Image: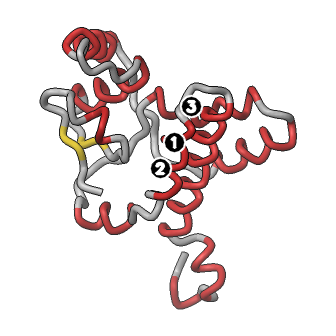
Amino acid sequence: MIARYTRPEMGHIWSDQNKFRTWLEVELAATETLAEVGLVPQSAAVAIREKGDFDLVAWLEEHPDEVVAFPPTVWQQLVFGTFAWDPVRALKRERHLRQFDAPVSVFSRKHAERAAQIAAELKRFQIGFADCQIAACALEDDAELLTFNKQHFCHVTGLRLASA
């Protein structure tokens, strides 16, 4: 949008900040849904909602060369509701997901092998199958991981966690 031809109200709707807030709401809804079916602890869903004020726009401005992409496991969790929920709620989720323009990273053989290696190395600190896959994507793609779940990911050797 061209700022000088855009009304402030419309500029806000299409702003990066509003886009990221919408992404946050989608992620929060996915986490809360996974908590409802017992795949995520309720306490984690509450903590994520409480920490949801992370300013992704500011982070991106501080890291202009970073490529933003979703690990496939995260995207799978986001899309879950479009298949599992009642049609009205599923359609709402689907509309929110269509607003994303960040790509989903590839999960290849090297990613799967790295995830297996992480799981084997972390026998003492079980972080879960999905978190091993997410960490493997970040490691193999030489990326920083943006997460509030530092309690799990801090045990992964070599994984760079973005300061949030």
* Residue on which disc 1 sits: 43
Res. 47 mark: 2
Tell me what residue is drawn at x 54 percent, y 49 percent. Answer: 46
Above or below, 36 against 61 in this view is: above
* x and y percentages locating residue 161 in the rendered image: 23, 44
Considering only vertical position in the picture, is 61 above or below 151? below
Q: Is residue 17 left or right of residue 158?
A: right
Query: Of label 2 and label 3, which has the lower sequence position?
Result: 2
Instruction: Check disc 3 and give the amino acid type.
Output: Gln
Residue found farthest to the front: 43
Q: Is mark 1 in CB contact (under 8 Å) with mark 2?
A: yes
Q: Secondary structure at mark 2?
A: helix
Image quadrant in which you'd find residue 60: bottom left
- Give x and y (percent) for residue 10: 65, 79
Image position of 66 (left or right of 50): left
Please name the amino acid that badge 1 sits on. Ser
Residue in the picture at 56% in, 49% down: 100
**Image color mode:** secondary structure
Total labels drawn = 3
Q: What residue sits 43% from the left and 23% below the top?
A: 130
Image quadrant in which you'd find residue 152? top left
Judge from the rendering whether residue 45 lies leftward or rightward of residue 58; answer left or right: right
Quadrant of the rendered image containing residue 18: bottom right
Q: To which residue does mark 3 refer?
A: 77
Q: Nearer the viewer, mark 2 or mark 3?
A: 2
Tell me residue 145's x, y (percent). 29, 41
Q: Please tell me whether residue 23 is drawn above or below residue 36 in the rendered image.
A: below
Q: Earlier in the sequence, mark 1 or mark 3?
A: 1
Query: Between 54 and 56, which is closer to the camera in this rendering?
Result: 54
Q: Is residue 68 left or right of residue 73?
A: left
Marks 2 and 3, Cα distance to the nearest angstrom?
A: 18 Å
